[in-house]
């Protein structure tokens, strides 16, 4: 079984009770709640900063079901390299996506995202199941 890094859009879709996100997370989180999947600290930030107060306990439990990988100096260096490469190609890569991509690459994780085009040409393995893209 592959190990996964779950992107913010999937977690946010789950919080909005989208059935496709719920089904997808069932695939990447074992039923015994052992953290075989991870999120980046960037994903945790993006999800938590947008919370309305009543949702917080539910979302915290969901986030706690993942291993949360920190942004390290190595992550920052690789993310900066990815941003520079994309800029040289005439493409924009935002900081959050660059840090998430770098986290997936460093840890050898398959990225689960609905924003596949954000991560195209970065060398990141993307989850291949059909998922509605933006």
Image (cartoon, rainbow, N blue to C red):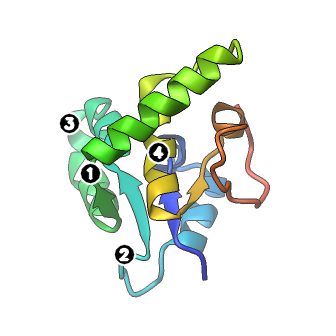
Label 1 or label 2, whichever lies nearer to me, is: 1
Quarter of the image for the C terminus: give it: top right
Distance Cα–Cα, label 2 vs label 3:
25 Å
Residue 91 found in image quarter: top right
Distance Cα–Cα, label 3 vs label 4:
31 Å
Label 4 or label 2, whichever lies nearer to me, is: 4
| Image x and y of residue 23, in percent | 62, 65
Mark 3 Cα shell of 10 Å, populated few (<14), some (14-19), many (≥20): few
Residue drawn at x 52%, y 54% as measured from the top left: 105
Distance Cα–Cα, label 4 vs label 1:
11 Å
Label 2 or label 3, whichever lies nearer to me, is: 2
Mark 1 Cα shell of 10 Å, populated few (<14), some (14-19), many (≥20): few
Distance Cα–Cα, label 4 vs label 2:
20 Å
Distance Cα–Cα, label 3 vs label 1:
25 Å
Contact check, label 3 and label 4, Cβ < 8 Å:
no
Residue beneath disc 4 = 102
Residue beneath disc 1 = 70
Residue beneath disc 2 = 35
Contact check, label 1 and label 2, Cβ < 8 Å:
no
| Image x and y of residue 46, in percent | 35, 34
């Amino acid at each position: 079984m592959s190990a996964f890094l779950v992107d913010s859009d999937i977690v946010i879709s789950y919080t909005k009770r989208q059935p496709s996100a719920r089904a997808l997370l069932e695939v990447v989180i074992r039923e015994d709640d052992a953290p075989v999947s991870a999120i980046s600290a960037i994903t945790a930030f993006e999800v938590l900063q947008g919370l309305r107060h009543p949702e917080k306990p539910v979302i915290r439990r969901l986030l706690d079901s993942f291993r949360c990988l920190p942004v390290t100096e190595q992550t920052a260096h690789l993310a900066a390299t990815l941003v520079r490469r994309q800029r040289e190609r005439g493409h924009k890569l935002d900081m959050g996506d660059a840090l998430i991509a770098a986290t997936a690459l460093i840890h050898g994780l398959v990225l689960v995202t609905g924003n596949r085009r954000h991560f195209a040409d970065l060398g990141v393995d993307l989850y291949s199941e059909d998922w509605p893209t933006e």
